Amino acid sequence: MTQRKEKVASYIKELAAEFLARENNRTSLITVTHATVSPDLKRSTIYITVLPNSKEANALGFVKRKRKELREFFKKKLTIKSIPFIDIAIDLGEKNRQKIDELLRNG
């Protein structure tokens, strides 16, 4: 990633975490683990983890429903020409890491 892309992705991650902390319905813990940005800065994927795991589908639906409001929040805070289209995904890498940690503890 270029330095500009890294900065934009990092800032998007911070802003998404701030937005979700404010908007979260408190039935689950939603954590923004990282964000990626396309080379043209037109698309961004925000990766989240959810605790407890049983609330994952509901939390993902909630965050996806809030995408329009999140984009408006970005418009106020980001200083780039065009605000990227936002996609939300569960961070499977983090889930796998947590599973490995659990297996190592219990093994």
Image (cartoon, grey):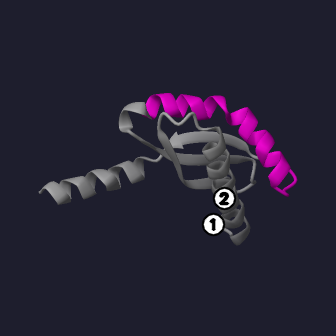
Q: Nearer the viewer, residue 57 or 87?
A: 57
Residue 17 appears in view: yes
| Residue at the image position 61 percent from the left and 46 percent from the top | 21
**Mark 1 secondary-structure assignment:** loop
* Residue marked by disc 1: 1
Residue 81 included in the magenta stretch of the image? yes
- Judged from the image, the secondary structure of the residue bearing numbered disc 2 is helix
Against 82, residue 10 (above or below) is below
> x%, y% of residue 3?
69, 71
Classify 10 Å Cα crowding around label 1: few (below 14), some (14-19), many (20 and above): few
Q: In the rendered structure, are the residues bearing label 1 and label 2 in contact, judged by CB atoms less than 8 Å apart?
A: yes
Q: Is residue 50 above or below residue 68?
A: below
For this view, does 32 lie left or right of residue 106?
right
Q: 23 or 59: which is nearer to us? A: 23
Q: On the rendered structure, is 25 left or right of 82? A: left
Q: Quadrant of residue 80?
A: bottom right
Estimate how packed mark 2 is, as few (under 14), some (14 to 19) or many (20 or more) residues with alpha carbons within 10 Å. many
Residue 83 in sight: no
Q: Which residue is mark 2?
A: 9
Q: Is residue 49 above or below residue 37?
A: above
User: Real-space Cα distance between discs 1 and 2?
Assistant: 10 Å
Residue numbers of the magenta segment: 56-82
Amino acid type, callout 2: Ala
Q: Is residue 52 left or right of residue 49?
A: left
- x and y, in percent, of residue 49 in the image: 46, 46
Disc 1 marks which amino acid?
Met
